Amino acid sequence: MKLSTLENYNDIVIQMHDNPDADAIGSGYAIYRYLQSKGKSPRLVYSGDYIITKSNIKILIKELKLPVEYITSLDNPELLITVDCQYGEGNVKYFEAQNVAVIDHHNTGKLSDDMAEIRSHLVSCSTICFDMLRKEGYDLKSDVALSTALYYGLYMDSNGFGELRHSLERDMIDELIIDKGLIKKMVHSNFTIQELETAGIALIRYSFDENRGVSIIKSKPCDPNILGLIGDLVLQVDSINVCVIYNECNGGYKLSVRSCVTDVAANDVAKYLTEGIGNGGGHNDKAGGYISKKNYENKYGDMGIELYFFERVNAYYESYDTIYAKDGIHDNTDFELYTKLPYSYGYIKSTDIFEKGEEFRMRSLEGVDVYVVAGEDLYIMLGYYGEAYPIKRDKFLQKYRETNNAYTKEFEYNPSVRSMKTDETNELIPYAKECICCDGAKILAKPIEKTTKVFTKWEHDRYIQGEPGDMLCKSVDDDYDIYLIKWEVFEVTYKKEAE
Ligand SMILES: [Mn+2]
């Protein structure tokens, strides 16, 4: 959906979910400001059984003078836009409307269309609104109130930025110009004395698997930030490596995962625990997720949620194999010989964008930053998914051939680079040219049958994970050079050698 579509209506109401949180308010206010800038006079409303009482939310509305209204009825508006929730779902009061639009980041199975923007891979709805406003050319830099509301929405939905999932979220943090004093004030008005007690009670009722060093904790309903706080504290215990903490919330369950070991990434656990019934993600050490009660009941019937977490965490530990490159693979049974195909990629000479010697930052799809210095010997590669990474000129010339064509591939996330000197951001695609991989390298590969974690010889503190069907690869002449390639990538970039 394009935001400009909404301009075709006049009598417009933006509705946040009942008991709106910071993310709903940031998102709602973003759409409100956008429509206002187009000469519309929308309303920003919420309904439900409760009027806002949380102290941080009250500060947010008061200090930024947000035009939030509490309503109990609505007179069939021409357009109703629900934000951070989906029309007809249990967490948002139902009102009749002539037309409905939806902007949300929860996974209910519904997909984006002309009147819906749903991106469940993002941790906050504020991120979606930030991206939509930016694409329409809205000047966020001169709207500090809105920028602050969006920033706080992302902050709160990502557990204080601890569960960011996508590089777009980091871009947003970098780009917004905000009222830092107000953010600080709200961050320190986050829980009440009662919530401190909730954390205390959760901490004395825990389960603990001694062999694996895993603790599972159920808390009373509370703010997601408190879940994270309890998790952080529990992980300080010497014998606990991984901690899962969850509770009931609005229409489902919220969970938080913490890990301090390299062979179990918190984001993988969160994804596993929410698979098919919600969404989860984050980082190696901190992650979070949400399970929809409706999806849970469809899949697991009346099985208790405590039993579910117990069994599912156990199943997770049984679900994968781990391969350490340092141990090597010395048995080539089932491995077959493959040759790399001439597949086309994009590349940019760093000096086409930056001055020689200028430092700049590149960001991976997972939001990991790499800092490099521009120079004639440094090129930037665009990989299979459009991900950018640095490559030395020598290495580039060995592996790739320039075609002199423009690079025309399109990706969901446009990679960009940021100068450390000027703080300016540049999109890479407009500078990119096409090159063809032509090294014809030969490798040994075989499909994996079980989820597999591989620690390569380059990285000891994080693994790459493959799913059944992905290819386990090794060098023809080095038993210790082991890695994984996703099947969808392998299929188009390698071909089997004739026997
Ligand atoms: Mn949200």
Image (cartoon, grey):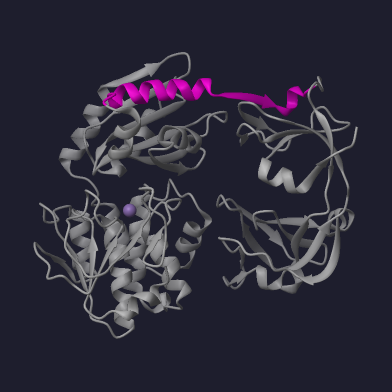
Task: Answer left or right for 168 relative to 102.
Answer: right
Q: Is residue 144 above or below residue 435?
A: below
In the image as oriented, which residue stretches furthest toward the top? 211
Q: In the image, what residue occupies the spot 69% across and 26% down?
A: 324
Q: Is residue 337 left or right of residue 181?
A: right
Question: Which range of residues does the magenta coloring cover?
Answer: 302-329
* Residue 289 position by quadrant: top left
The picture places residue 287, in percent across and down from the top left corner, at: 44, 40
Residue 86, percent from left and from top: 29, 56
Question: Eyeballing the image, is 298 above or below 155?
Answer: above
Work out whether 122 lies above or below 271: below
In the rendered structure, does residue 64 fall within the stretch colored magenta?
no
Q: Is residue 322 left or right of residue 328?
A: left
Tell me the quarter of the picture where residue 185 sits: bottom left
Task: Specify whether residue 181 is in view.
Answer: no
Quadrant of the rendering where the C terminus is positioned:
top right
Residue 450 placed where, x, y %? 61, 26
The quarter in which the N terminus is drawn is bottom left
Q: Residue at x 37, y 21 (%)?
A: 310
Q: Is residue 174 left or right of residue 306?
A: right
